[in-house]
Amino acid sequence: MIEYFEQIVDMLDEAYFGKAAVGLYDQEKFILTKQGSKIQIPHKPGDALVEGSATYRTVKEGKKVTQHAELLGVKFYTVSYPIIINGEVIGGLVISVPEELMGLEEKLQDTSHLLVASMEQISAAIENIAASAQGLAEGGQLVSNSSQEVQGKAEAMEEVVQYIDSVASDTKLLGLNASIEAARAGETGRGFGVVAQEIRSMAVSSATSAKDIRKIIGGIRKDISKMTDELGKFGNNTQEVSASIEEISASIESLTQNAIQLQEMASKL
Amino acid sequence: MKQYIEFILGIENYVIEMSYVREIIKPVHITELVGVPEFVKGVSKIRDEVITIIDLHQKFNIDSATCEAYEPRIIILEFNSENIGLLVNDVVDILESDNITNVPSLIHHGIIREILNLEDKILPIFDIERLFSSDVTQWLNSEEIS
């Protein structure tokens, strides 16, 4: 009759993922043993039950016996169950499970808790980065607008300078003609000639100033041009960053889903 | 000390005695004339007067394209109550000097006779009499006579 229980041995072996050792015994000896990948029963079919061992006591006392032991550095937990038919102990089942397997569900739960917490932290950090990238992009746009304004002002300045230039040119002409008239007037024109000279000097300095301003404006425009180029590059970079952030977010999202699933599975253990 | 007006014609700087200069003006509309020598650009109305405008570019073989950066002017010259407007590329300044050297009259179609010697440069002097009595004005005079 004990042979009917042989099927259970296989089932138990599978249930513990092959890591536990399972044994079936009758009132005197082992009938079937399945060794575990992590732990072995030091018996084979046909071996007599050892006096004082869990299996022996199960048969003699007719009740479940549990035991903690260590073999070759592996801590394990043994449960021995009697098989009682019509009030008689005909044998029993013994399972030895490595203790690490027992704590596993707790460990799994803790790990998955940590994982979900980490995921949430990372998500928060990603949101921060995304907000910063957005801020950067907006800042960049503002700078771009400002530089366009400056460009416009530089062009307006250019017009003013051109006007100064034309005034200087006319003033020079006026001064020359005044000097000519002064020379024509001879002695009486001498004072006038001095005035004419001054006017000509004014014209020269105005023209020089206009040239200097032109140079400065040219420099400003070059700087703006450079800045606009850099801004263009900057804009591209921020866009790339934003795109990367979106990718990371998607990955985090799917990871979080997996972590939550893991948590649910662990809680059901 | 005599005063001279320094101007640019083509790529060279020249001077002319200021006593012959009546006025310097900005270029005005020049009415072209038919059947005139190429150095006569045309006539212009300046202060209610009609003045002949002379352009010596061709005579001096000057390429007009090189004169872009300057401010062209018309120097109105007066000699023996005759007026000519000389088209120049720019008027530079008024100079004072007494240092004159003679040069052979073969240079510049006879219009240059003397050179003004300055500290840092020498400038050919446009000879007004030559200008007014050369073929430039021969034609003008002949026209007026007839």
Image (cartoon, coloured by chain):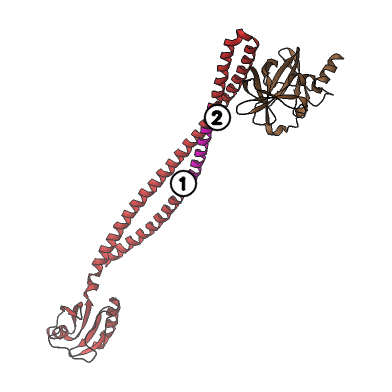
Chain colours: A red, B brown
Q: Tell me the SS state at disc 1.
A: helix
* Amino acid bearing label 1: Phe
Mark closer to the chain start, 2 or 1: 2
Measured as percent of width and height from the top left, residue A172 is found at 60, 20
Tell me where residue A162 appears, x and y as whole percent: 57, 27
> Label 1 neighbourhood size at 10 Å, few (<14), some (14-19), many (20+)?
some
Left/right of residue B69 with respect to residue B127 in the rendered view: left
Identify the residue at horizontal 66%, vertical 24% (top origin): B116
Is B19 located above or below residue A82 in the figure? Answer: above
Q: Main secondary structure of the magenta part?
A: helix
Question: Do marks 2 and 1 share a chain?
Answer: yes
Give the farthest residue toward the top.
Answer: A188
Amino acid at pointer 2: Lys
Tell which of B63 and A218 is nearer to you.
B63
Q: Residue A3: say if magenta.
A: no
Q: Quadrant of residue B7?
A: top right
Magenta region: which residues? Answer: A209-235
Q: Position of residue A101 (x, y in %)?
A: 24, 73
- Asked if residue A267 shows in the view, the reply is no
Q: In the shown orientation, is residue A89 left or right of residue B9?
A: left
x and y, in percent, of residue A197 in the image: 57, 17
The residue tagged 2 is: A211
User: Residue A41: which quarter of the image?
Assistant: bottom left
Q: Which circle marks residue A234 in the picture?
A: 1
Front in this rendered view, residue A160 or A7: A160
